């Protein structure tokens, strides 16, 4: 589990850090305050292997398919300056020392811009030998693993009933879901009704996303999961169920770090957390001032007491 994260020269952040991260972390603040950048930094800093620019593109939602990716990678550097390489430092709970990962530019024959490689510092003696993985669910990243594969992990862990109750409570009159074969004999997740079935993928973006979030969280244990605005495409009732899945994952030992613009999501997280577990929740209000990442932190019952302040930030 991530305990702290420091960021230098990455996207719009010249310098900044978040400390005392809890099992459930919520990032709030206006557009452009650095929420997405913090999630991307956590993904890169938490990777056990060297991270390439293409990895960042495939696992974050920032570059769109029509973008000039080489040009976009320039802006992974603060103010697009290749002379100011990004660097991150992360501390993990229950692991000694800190872990620092920095970037460098490499020749890229035939291209205008160099390749960017994020790697652990070679002389870092405090690098943890092993640690739980950090994974992202986002506009692009959440599609990285097909739904049938995630569902298989849920079944293997004996959590199908939990996932079924969560999803089907919102997809009435569906009675079940099941993997069926398509015309190419490939597995496709279907919603089962009394006398017909339809693929989950065509049941609506919100239903598809809720399935994926529910399955992904049920399949994870002991890792850190990053979400960018999990409320997107979800009806308020589905947001409430999504919060239930998040809190259940936290109870099983998964750390969840998410960004949101939804007061409904925060209210739902509070409602699903037992009072004894409220200290697992922290909310960071972010702002960006001339490249400096600033934050205010609320934890546990402070989040409940400061609801009206959060409402102002989110509205």
Image (cartoon, rainbow, N blue to C red):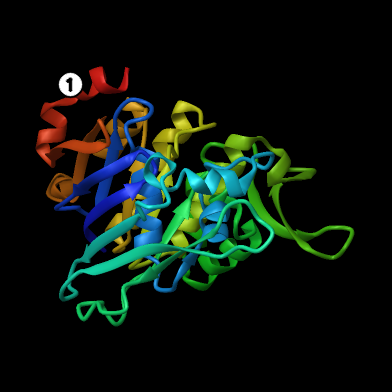
Residue at 43% from the left image edge and 34% from the top image edge: 239
Q: Nearer the viewer, residue 97 or 118?
A: 118
- Where is residue 189? Give x, y as percent: 69, 54
- Where is residue 174? Give x, y as percent: 65, 41
Q: Nearer the viewer, residue 213 or 2?
A: 2
Report the side of 200 relative to 212 (left or right): right
Residue at 19% from the left image edge and 74% from the top image edge: 95
Residue at 43% from the left image edge and 51% from the top image edge: 82
Report the side of 103 relative to 252 (left or right): right
Callout 1 secondary element: helix
* Crowd band around label 1 with a 10 angstrom C-alpha radius: few (<14), some (14–19), many (20+): few
Q: Quadrant of residue 146?
A: bottom right
Quadrant assignment for the N terminus? bottom left
Q: Is residue 126 above or below residue 304?
A: below
Report the side of 233 relative to 88 (left or right): right
Q: Nearer the viewer, residue 112 or 260?
A: 112
- Where is residue 6? Give x, y as percent: 23, 54
- Where is residue 24? Give x, y as percent: 26, 49
Q: Which residue is mark 1?
A: 309
Quadrant assignment for the C terminus? top left
Q: Is residue 93 visible?
A: yes
Residue at 32% from the left image edge and 48% from the top image edge: 9
């Amino acid at each position: 589990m991530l305990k702290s994260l420091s960021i230098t020269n990455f996207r719009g952040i010249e310098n900044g850090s978040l400390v005392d991260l809890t099992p459930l972390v919520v990032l709030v603040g206006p557009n452009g305050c650095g929420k997405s950048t913090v999630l991307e930094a956590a993904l890169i800093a938490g990777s056990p292997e060297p991270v390439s620019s293409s990895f960042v593109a495939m696992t974050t939602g920032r570059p769109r398919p029509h973008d000039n990716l080489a040009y976009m990678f320039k802006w992974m550097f603060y103010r697009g300056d290749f002379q100011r390489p990004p660097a991150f430092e992360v501390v993990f709970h229950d692991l000694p020392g800190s872990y620092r990962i920095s970037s460098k530019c490499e020749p890229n024959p035939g291209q205008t811009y160099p390749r960017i490689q994020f790697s652990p510092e070679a002389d870092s003696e405090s690098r943890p030998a092993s640690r739980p993985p950090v994974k992202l669910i986002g506009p692009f990243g959440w599609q990285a693993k097909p739904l049938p594969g995630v569902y298989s992990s849920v079944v293997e862990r004996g959590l199908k009933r939990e996932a079924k109750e969560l999803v089907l409570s919102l997809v009435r009159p569906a009675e079940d879901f099941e993997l069926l074969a398509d015309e190419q004999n490939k597995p496709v997740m279907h919603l089962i009704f009394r006398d017909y079935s339809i693929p989950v993928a065509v049941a609506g973006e919100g239903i598809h996303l809720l399935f994926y979030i529910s399955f992904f969280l049920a399949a994870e244990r002991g890792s850190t999961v990053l979400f960018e605005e999990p409320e997107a495409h979800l009806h308020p009732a589905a947001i409430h169920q999504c919060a239930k899945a998040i809190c259940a994952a936290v109870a099983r030992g998964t750390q969840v770090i998410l960004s949101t613009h939804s007061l409904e999501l925060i209210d739902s997280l509070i409602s699903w957390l037992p009072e004894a577990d409220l200290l697992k929740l922290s909310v960071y209000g972010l702002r960006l001032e001339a490249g400096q990442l600033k934050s205010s932190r609320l934890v546990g019952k402070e989040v409940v007491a400061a609801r009206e302040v959060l409402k102002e930030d989110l509205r």
